Amino acid sequence: MRVEVQMMLLVLAVPAQYYLASVSSNDRSYYTKRLVGNIQNWYSSYFNLTTWKWWLDSLMLDALEIEEGFCPAVEVEKFRSGDENFAKSTIPRTPRPPHVRYRIGQVIRHRQWGYRGVIVGWDPVAKAPKEWLDHMHPADKPHWRKKANYLVLVDTRDRLTPQSTYVAEENIEILTNRKIIHPKVGDHFEEFDNSRYIPRPWLRKVYPDD
């Protein structure tokens, strides 16, 4: 198996060199790190015990569906999809893409709806079910899906029920010297330094470059 992987990397090396030569020197380091990271993620995704277990489970489920008309269990479907939407993935966001403007711990105001909140996560592009995106993103704003989107804990002074929202970058306005009231703030952050919240170690591991 290792020989096949090495051959694949050799085949990809030449087009990768051509691509990297075409980008500016400022972005070359970012794209090089991202390429290496993607290869590592691909290798770890396909060559590990969890993936093989999922593959075997899938074969068993398919066989049951054919032979008995069995409907896959909800928990298995959750395992297949994972909790990857709305900036909830725990895969480290490194290297940090240069187009992502804001960082975890920054306090914001929603430009359209006016509520305050604190950023607890982000995706380099929108990552949510298509039905949600179709409903929440206006038809005249298709670019929202291709830009960073942020997971925000909403201040309970603005919305009484504790909740989080997923906000397109265009709708964010940064606030300073403002603290947020939300029951989960302490789960994500250690303290407030008058400009932003300081993330706890577990959150810092997901966003090491923020």
Image (spheres, helix red, strand yellow):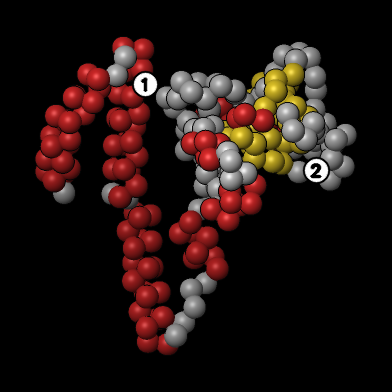
Q: Nearer the viewer, residue 3 or 111?
A: 111
Q: Which residue is drawn at 76% across and 43% down?
A: 163
Which secondary structure lies at badge 2? loop
- Residue 60 on image: x %, y %: 36, 74
Q: Is residue 135 left or right of residue 19?
A: right
Which secondary structure lies at badge 1? helix
Image-quadrant location for residue 94? top left
Q: Residue at x 60, y 30 (%)?
A: 169
| Residue at the bottom extreme of this rendering | 68
- Residue occupied by mark 1: 30
- Residue 143 on image: x %, y %: 52, 36
| Residue type indicated by callout 1 | Tyr
Where is 2 relative to 198, above or below?
below
Is residue 25 shown to the viewer in this render? Answer: yes
Q: Residue at x 79, y 33 (%)?
A: 115
Q: Residue at x 37, y 21 (%)?
A: 30
| Numbered label attached to residue 205 | none
Local crowd size for mark 2, using a 10 Å CA cut-off: few (<14), some (14–19), many (≥20): some
- Residue occupied by mark 2: 162
Image mark count: 2
Where is 57 relative to 51, above or below?
below
- Residue 187 on image: x %, y %: 70, 35
Q: Which of 90 and 97 is in front in this view?
A: 97
Q: Which of 23 and 17 is in front in this view?
A: 23
Give the CA separation, mark 1 to mark 2: 37 Å
